[in-house]
Structures are given as C-alpha cells and as structure tokens.
Image (cartoon, helix red, strand yellow):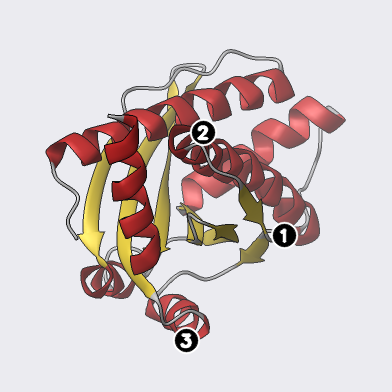
Amino acid sequence: MHLNDIHQDAIKESMNIGIGKAASVLSNLIDHPIDIPLPRISFTKIETMRNLFDTHYQNWSSCVEMEFSGEFEGDSILIFNKQSAYRWTQIISQAQFGSVEEVVPEMEKDLLLEVGNIIINSCIGSISNLLDTVVNYQLPVFFTHVGSGLFDDLLERNRSLDFGIIINSNFVFAAEEISMDLVVTVQKSSIEYVLNQLLSLA
C-alpha cells in the first residue's frame, strides 16, 4: 500500500499542528515567545533512512528516542545537533533555575528529555487525533550518540519497521533559529491502518 499526495498532505498538516503545539508548550515553559517557520516534512522507506544515520546524522550531538504503540505503532527519535542541544539546555536551565554557571551532563540529559517528551508527544499525539485512535508511549530514552549503530539497534528491536517520516523543524527564539529533526519510523501494518483511516475519514 502506498501513501499518495493526498495522504501525505494530511499527515504533513497533522505534523505541522503537532510542531505548533510543541512550540506553545515550550514557550510557556520558558515564558518567552517561540516562532515556528513551516517545517520540511519528507517520507522515505526504512532502507533509505539508515543511510541518513550513517552520513547526515553521524556527527549530530544527541537524541531522545520514544517508542509508541497501538493501531499506529512505531518509534520516534528527536535529534539535536551540538548547537541545538547546547541552546535548549541553556534556555530551559535559565528559565527554570535562573543563572546556572555550568550545566552538568545529568542536567543536560534531563532538560533534553523534557524537550523531546514535549515535541514527540505533540507530534505523535496530533497524528493519533487525525486517525481518531489512542497511542501508548514508552518512557523516553536519551542517547549521547547518533549514527548508524543507533538505527541498527532500533531495527534489531523492531524488525517490522517499514516506513519513515522526517520532520526538519526550526524553533525561533529571540531571533535565533534552533534546528532539530524528528524521525518517525512506523510499521507496515500502521501504514495500512493510516490509509484505511484516512479513506474512512475522507
């Protein structure tokens, strides 16, 4: 089964809503406006996605992974480059604790887990609303490395993953763009479910 342009547009619109919701929650968290240019959203097969982790994401700083299950089932990875990891840690630590001389690794982990939890829940939750279904989340996990090894581990744990959605987003804080990528991988059965649901809602 194949997602045509109409199906992809529906998912893109849902993801746009999710990113907007995440920006609103983060804005309330730091008590400062956050703007969101329209994210770039692309769809790819799982085989192609591994090459991205082997090349494009190889030198990115860290990521937050969260599995989700239900009729719509898969895995999500929010990936930070070095600048975005540093800036989110700095911005949220200042908002929550005031002036912080040095952010220790454990604090960085907790703060980025919070950012990841907000963004992933907002985006996957938006798709579950579109499909009128319930999604269950596992606890988020923080990794200090990004690369093909991480993606291979993901595939080893879930060999049914078949399809990927990549959301390139920029969160604009005080005229500064903070870039992150959300990678969502879903099972073949979930794609079939998405198609059936979108057809029934059409």
Q: How crowded is mark 1: few (under 14 residues within 10 Å), some or many (20 or more)?
A: few
Q: Could you tell me how far apart the alpha carbons at marks 2 and 3 are, in whole angstroms?
A: 29 Å
| Residue in the image at 34% along x and 22% along y | 37
Secondary structure beneath disc 2?
Answer: helix
Q: Position of residue 84 (x, y in %)?
A: 50, 44
Give yes or no for contact between labels 1 and 2 (Cβ–Cβ under 8 Å).
Answer: no
53 or 163: which is nearer to us?
A: 163
Query: Which label belongs to residue 156?
Result: 3
Which quadrant of the figure contains the N terminus?
Answer: bottom left
Q: Quadrant of residue 159?
A: bottom left
- Name, please, the residue furthest toward the left: 5
**Res. 46 in view:** yes
Q: Position of residue 115 (x, y in %)?
A: 64, 42
Q: Could you tell me how far apart the alpha carbons at marks 1 and 2 are, in whole angstroms?
A: 20 Å
Relative to 3, residue 202 above or below: above
Q: What residue type is labelled 1?
A: Leu
Of label 1 and label 3, which has the lower sequence position? 1
Q: Which amino acid does label 3 sit on?
A: Glu
Q: In this view, does 118 lie to the left or right of 12?
A: right
Q: How crowded is mark 2: few (under 14 residues within 10 Å), some or many (20 or more)?
A: few
Query: Which label belongs to residue 33?
Result: none
Q: In which quarter of the image is residue 177?
A: top left
